[in-house]
DNA sequence: GATAGTATTAATATA
DNA sequence: TAATACTATC
């Protein structure tokens, strides 16, 4: 049956399960349970290649959906390398990108203006704050983020304000706010992220002809990271596939770590029922990590119940043991990590292949400082992204106003920035005028006389250039005429000068922006004659692509990021820092049902990032929000099997010393050096965990030998540090 | 209306 | 600690 692959190499090196997945029935849906490092992307792309080469589908019959632009690009690149086909006709993109495309194509049916704009989360927050003020609701009574969460949750449940009802006045008010918000967005022609999905769902659901068209077109839909889908995305897929399309869903329930933003792992089990799939295909062969690391990962995740069930295996040797280090405080932990990194560097490791992971961004600072002082290059992921910077958003707001002056959000952002004498008072007047006359802020501002005249003139001037000058020329006009550049240039602080450079960078981006490049994902043909086309495309691109890809990745540097950000990546060496109860698992997670299980999956993700070597470290004392706090080792560290661990404890501190900097660590060559065994105090070791009847679990941070017994200094976390004598205290080792 | 100084509060993050 | 929101003052 498969005797004539036009490119047999594509399929040859697959293992049995991978091949089973790639070649499963093209007419029916399938769920692929793909463990970490099991060749998930390869299976996904090879499946597409297989469908095409065996003529089960044409390029235009295929839709492939991902969550991130990065994943979409990766797939695009791999497919182009594999296949001779022109992939233009294939719809490959993120959920949001594809929905955006649908809405641009059918903006009339979707009841949107042709020039509709996309709101990012901070735009959304701004609108909500404005709305609350307008409705005269105190932010202390109803926090903007609460309302924002409510609105997004409703949209993700597919619910409009009109279909909602509640008995309690609190929820009733939320619903009223939601209704106002809907009207406001509609009036201003703006669409938030959740709206992209909901609106395109409703578009297809309400329009039988349109739905039938897409049903016959997309016979094969492939979905990456299926465990991350939210309920709306699932419903959207179900609707789109309702004409009998075969859905090829790839995911890993053990790597579901985005419940907090609406992801529903239950969608995997639901998928089996809804799409008539009897059995998922499991990819359990791991090609990434050495045996000990995999053993640890399997052991940790086994503490979770309600799994679909999967156990990773590898042919790789056991490799290094997992190095566990308990530091006196966060500074010492950082010092330890730096010294290990330097050692690895000397051994010839590429810094790009070393990852430094932490649970929350706040933990990066100490680590960064230590690396900086030691002159070890590092790169931190997850800061402010290019298109999220205030100066860039200011400039883009002017650009938005140039194509649509009725965009109130954009107007409020820049009507007095740079400062031009339009203060809160005037703005309130404009808002009142707009409210009474039922117009937009811009229209109201036009009637306000000489106070607002220069601003109105400025916007009119920019409007006049739309379609007349090129995109970069328009951006240049924005920067010059608005006074943004001048304003930042006049600032004294160095940080402000960086903003000037970012604005120049924006101009650069506009100069090199090619509408054709985003065509694949965004640009429908019906806009081609629109004068504002390049601007709309540029703005949409800025909203959907946060600009992460602009980050320079040239030089070799330690890769620092949160565990969340590390998902999907792999490194030779991984440092997992801050492994204390309350940090990881986060104490906030412990209050939510299922929170601990999600944290454990996060731990699983963290462990499986490492190919060869994994370090797990913790600090008994840590500076948090400006105050020092005590911590005990994370329960996840206890869940690591002892036989794959190697404990690296600091030598006992010299008596009268408060300084930590002279603390030495075991200098370990690649093999374990047993020359310096940790000292024994009546059977206890420094760094060891013990349990006390009253104080609970603690860690031994110091000890004094007293012959037949020993005095141990033990850190019991919230219960503080105690000095206990082994002759009296009942201490159990863990 | 602009700005400097004080109070408040805190996770994870994609589009 | 650090970012942001609010208040007091020029």
Image: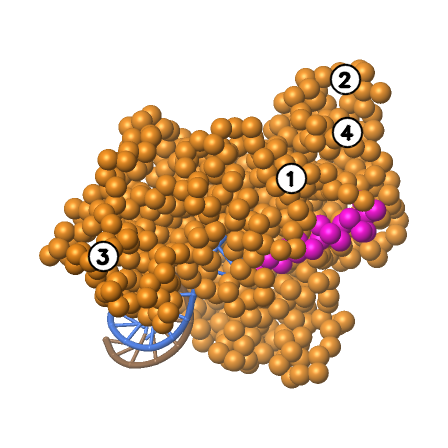
Chain colours: A orange, B blue, C brown
Residue at image point 53% right, 46% down: A299
Q: Are marks 1 and 3 on the same chain?
A: yes
State whether residue A104 appears in this view: no
Is tag 3's residue or tag 4's residue first in the polypeptide sequence? Answer: 4
Magenta region, mostly helix, strand or loop?
Answer: helix
Mark 4 or 2, closer to the camera: 4
Q: Is residue A615 above or below residue A730?
A: above
Which region is colored magenta? A258-277
Question: What residue is disc 3 on?
Answer: A702
Q: Classify mark 1: residues with Cα within 10 Å, few (<14), some (14-19) or many (20+).
A: many
Q: CA distance from mark 4 to mark 2?
A: 12 Å
Marks 1 and 3, how far apart in space? 45 Å
Q: Chain of mark 2?
A: A
Residues under numbered marks 4 and 2 in contact, where contact means CB atoms less than 8 Å apart: no
- The picture places residue A684, in percent across and down from the top left corner, at 28, 54
- Give the number of the mark in front: 2 or 3: 3
Disc 3 chain ID: A
Residue at label 4?
A23
SS for callout 2: loop
Residue A5's disc is 2
- Alpha carbon separation for disc pair 2 and 3: 67 Å
Whether the residues at callouts 2 and 1 have beta carbons within 8 Å, the answer is: no
Label 1 resides on the chain identified as A
Q: Is circle 3 on the same chain as circle 4?
A: yes
Q: Chain of mark 4?
A: A
């Amino acid at each position: 049956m498969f005797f004539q692959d036009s490119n047999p190499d594509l399929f040859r090196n697959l293992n049995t399960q991978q091949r089973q997945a790639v070649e499963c029935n093209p007419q029916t849906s399938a769920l692929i349970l793909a463990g970490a490092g099991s060749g998930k992307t390869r299976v996904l792309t090879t499946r597409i290649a297989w469908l095409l080469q065996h003529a089960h589908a044409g390029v235009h019959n295929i839709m492939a959906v991902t969550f991130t632009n990065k994943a979409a690009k990766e797939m695009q690149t791999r497919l182009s390398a594999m296949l001779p086909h022109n992939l233009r006709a294939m719809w490959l993109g993120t959920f949001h990108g594809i929905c955006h495309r649908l809405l641009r194509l059918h903006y009339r049916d979707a009841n949107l203006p042709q020039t509709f704009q996309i709101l990012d989360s901070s735009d959304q927050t701004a609108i909500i704050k404005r709305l609350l003020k307008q409705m005269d609701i105190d932010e202390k009574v109803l926090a903007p983020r609460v309302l924002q969460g409510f609105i997004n949750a409703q949209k993700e449940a597919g619910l409009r304000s009109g279909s909602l009802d509640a008995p309690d006045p609190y929820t009733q008010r939320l619903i009223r706010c939601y209704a106002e918000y809907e009207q406001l967005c509609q009036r201003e022609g703006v669409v938030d992220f959740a709206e992209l999905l909901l609106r395109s769902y409703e578009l297809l659901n309400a329009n039988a002809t349109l739905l039938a068209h897409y049903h016959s077109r997309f016979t094969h839909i492939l979905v990456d990271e299926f465990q991350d889908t939210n309920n709306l995305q699932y419903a959207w897929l179900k609707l789109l596939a309702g004409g009998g399309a075969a859905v090829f869903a790839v995911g890993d329930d053990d790597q579901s770590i985005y419940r907090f933003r609406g992801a529903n792992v239950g969608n995997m089990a639901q998928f089996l029922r809804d799409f008539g799939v009897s059995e998922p295909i499991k990819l359990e062969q791991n090609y990434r990590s050495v045996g000990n690391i995999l053993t640890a990962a399997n052991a940790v995740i086994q503490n979770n119940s309600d799994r679909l069930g999967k156990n990773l295996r590898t042919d790789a040797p056991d490799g290094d043991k997992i190095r566990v280090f308990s530091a006196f405080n966060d500074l010492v932990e950082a010092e330890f990590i730096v010294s290990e990194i330097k050692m690895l560097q000397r051994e010839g490791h590429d810094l790009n292949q070393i990852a430094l992971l932490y649970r929350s961004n706040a933990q990066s600072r100490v680590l960064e400082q230590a690396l900086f002082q030691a002159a070890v290059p590092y790169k931190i992921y997850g800061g402010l992204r290019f298109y999220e910077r205030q100066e860039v958003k200011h400039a883009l707001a002017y650009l938005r106003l140039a194509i649509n002056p009725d965009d109130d959000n954009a107007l409020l952002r820049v009507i007095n920035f740079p400062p031009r004498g339009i203060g809160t008072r005037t703005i309130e007047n404009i808002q009142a005028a707009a409210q009474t006359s039922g117009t937009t802020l811009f229209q109201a501002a036009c009637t306000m006389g000489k106070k607002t005249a220069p601003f109105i003139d400025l916007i009119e001037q920019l409007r006049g250039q739309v379609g007349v000058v090129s995109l970069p020329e328009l951006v240049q006009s924005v920067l010059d005429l608005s006074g943004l550049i001048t304003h930042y240039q006049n600032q004294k602080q160095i940080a402000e000068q960086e903003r000037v450079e970012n604005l120049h960078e924006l101009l650069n981006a506009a100069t090199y922006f090619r509408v054709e490049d985003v065509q694949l994902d965004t640009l429908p043909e019906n806009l081609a004659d629109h004068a504002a086309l390049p601007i709309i495309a540029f703005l949409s691109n800025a909203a959907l692509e946060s600009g992460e890809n602009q980050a320079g990745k040239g030089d070799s540097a330690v890769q620092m990021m949160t565990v969340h950000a590390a998902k999907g990546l792999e490194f030779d060496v991984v440092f997992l820092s801050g492994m204390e109860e309350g940090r990881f698992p986060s104490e906030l997670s412990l209050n939510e049902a299922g929170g601990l299980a999600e944290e454990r999956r996060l731990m699983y993700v963290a462990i499986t990032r490492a190919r060869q070597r994994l370090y797990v470290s913790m600090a008994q004392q840590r500076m948090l929000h400006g105050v020092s706090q005590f911590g005990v080792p994370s329960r996840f560290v206890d869940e690591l099997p002892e036989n794959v661990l190697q404990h690296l404890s600091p030598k006992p501190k010299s008596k009268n010393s408060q300084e930590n900097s002279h603390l030495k660590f075991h200098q370990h060559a690649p093999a374990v050096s047993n020359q310096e065994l940790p000292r024994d105090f009546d059977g206890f070791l420094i760094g060891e965990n013990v349990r006390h009847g009253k104080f609970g679990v603690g860690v031994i941070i110091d000890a004094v030998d007293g012959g037949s017994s020993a005095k141990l200094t033990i850190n019991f976390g919230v219960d503080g540090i105690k000095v206990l004598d082994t002759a009296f205290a009942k201490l159990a080792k863990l």
